[in-house]
Image (cartoon, coloured by chain):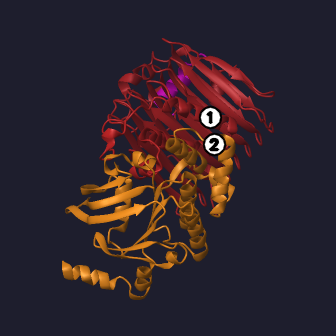
Amino acid sequence: MSELRISGLHVEVDTESGPKAILKGVDLTIRSGEVHAIMGPNGSGKSTLAYSIAGHPKYRITEGSVTLDGVELTELTVDERARAGLFLAMQYPIEVPGVSVANFLRTAKTALTGEAPKVRTWVKDVNVALERVGLDGSFAGRSLNEGFSGGEKKRNEIAQLELLNPKFAILDETDSGLDIDALRIVSEGVNRYTAQADRGLLLITHYTRILNYIKPDFVHVFVDGRVAEEGGPELADSLEIEGYDRFVKAVKADA
Amino acid sequence: MAAPVMEAVEALESHLHPTPSWELADHPLPSGREEVWRFSPLRALRGLLTDGGPTGENLEWATELPAGVSFDPISLEAARELAVEAPIDRVSALAAANASYAARLTVPAGLELTDPIVVNGAGVAGSSVAEHLVITVGAHAKATIVLRYTGTTTLADKTDLVVGDGAQVNFVSIQDWDSEAVHGGHHSVLVGRDAQVRTVTVSLGGKVVRLAETAKFAGPGGSLEQFGLYFVDAGQHIEHRLFVDHNAPHTHSNVDYRGALQGQGARSVWIGDVLIRKVAENISTYESNKNLVLTDGCRADSVPNLEIETGEIEGAGHSSTTGRFDDEQLFYLRSRGISEDEARRLVVHGFFADIIRRVGVPDVEARLMAAVEKELEIIVGNPVGVETTRAAGAAL
């Protein structure tokens, strides 16, 4: 049993007019075997949460902690966090010209496990993982994300999720911009990952649509840099009907 | 309708492309303030600019010549007759004037080669060499030519590549000098009608490398791709000055040079210029230069130019970028567990692999990747002054 615990997390970014607080005290605990969905309007800080946990240098943690099985992640480098078992599927995966998907995956797998994967089985594993998300084998030889469509980039993120198989995965709006077929394929990949039952998932999304395919155990409504309400899957259903207005208004009334 | 090519080749007043001339007097000793010299380390080049500089000494040539290909000494006069154009600067004028004899590499018309032609010129320490090399590739021939420089010398170089109509040529020049070599020169390419020419200029070694690379077309339909890569280490000056003269209609050119710099005093200069003459209707051209600055203490100058005399073209553009590592690329790779050093290595590797894979000649690609791997071994640790994440102290 593993645990990713976010406590009192405050994060700011530098803007032209000085530092700006984005996260204002986030508390959230994810245990292996659990699927958590974070939903919220644009600008509520959902992506900031994802990138802060992963260690993006743009985001400065001013208060609070993130621990994975008791290890303080905020004191680790980006790659150390990944090696501790964290994975972030990005909303806008980065293009890296000249670095093939196969080379990238082999380098990552080697870094994560401490030994190079066996060549014969690994090539097959990569091809299987790519094909399962609807990317043909030629993608292994292509430059990482370069010239991929938006949907292909997201599929590639999920192929990585399955191959690298981290303890905890954060999916940052993986569903955004996907057509219904791609959404289904991506969701199936995510469900294969969670079906192992000993992995934790934090699904960040703007839309309830993906929750038709991936069933969350917990839903957190994220507004203005903190969790405004928590509940089970039924909370997502009410969001589908009511939208975020109620929560946004409540936060404004508090302010 | 487009005018005949010959009518269009009028002299153009431009500081970017000096008038070619065989006469040394037409190329006075530069002061360093001239536009074409202002980026260059004249003191380090002095041995290439004075009358008594480059001598009739020669490089030690070694060749691998497939059947049908010849490599022979020729007279300076014969070389002038064959040349693409007269020297455009003092170094190449001295190269052509002071050489004791010139050399000609001949690929006869119609000869289609599978194996590359390899010509290796080795310098001997303490020598000062003038070389004029003319490469002629006959009509409809197919060849890959690798010209590699090794050793240490001070070389004034004039190289002409004359590509016949319909021929397909890959011309790779590798400046693989030892660290004290000084190499200045002028490489000219003439692209025959409907010919396809790809040049790859690789500058790795040497104290100073300063190459002017000019190209023009003998008729319509020609296609020219010029790739370059350079790795500049501490104290090195690597300069490439490109000029593509679109003097014929329906021609195509693409220039893509990439460099990485590391170490105190590493200096690169890239000047690109494309001239689209009035006659050059329906041409397309693009030139690009990218520099990756790996450490503090480096300087990369990159100046793309475009001179357009007709708007009746398919397309023309250029771009230039110089920067440190892309933080987002590093973050992405590191978020998958890859260490910072390894991520940097991957990014630099990819930066060059991205261009090497376009060379399209497996043998050459393998050589170039090997050269990049060798340079990558030099990249160490965490370069001073390059931003890292807030917790970077724990990384190493």
User: What residue does disc 2 label?
Assistant: B359
Contact between labelled residues 1 and 2, with CB atoms less than 8 Å apart: yes
| Residue B311 drawn in magenta | no
Q: Where residue B130 sits: x, y (%)?
A: 54, 20
Any idea which chain is the orange one in this picture? Answer: A
Residue, x 37% and y 35% (percent of image)? Answer: B396
In the visual, does A137 lie left or right of A76?
Answer: right
The one nearer the camera, B264 or A15, is A15
Do pointers 2 and 1 mark residues of a single chain? yes
Any idea which chain is the red one in this picture? Answer: B
Magenta stretch bounds:
B88-100
The one nearer the camera, B148 or A21, is A21
Name the chain letter of the residue that bears numbered label 1. B
Task: Label the magenta part by its dominant secondary structure.
Answer: helix
On screen, residue A27 above or below B277? below
The three-letter amino acid code for the residue at tag 1 is Val
Of labels 2 and 1, earlier in sequence is 1
Quick check: can you spot residue B363?
yes
* Quadrant of the snapshot with the N terminus of chain B: bottom right
Name the chain letter of the residue that bears numbered label 2. B
Q: Where residue B362 sits: x, y (%)?
A: 69, 38
The three-letter amino acid code for the residue at tag 2 is Val
| Residue B96 drawn in magenta | yes
In the visual, does B376 lie left or right of A74?
Answer: right
Res. B172 mark:
1
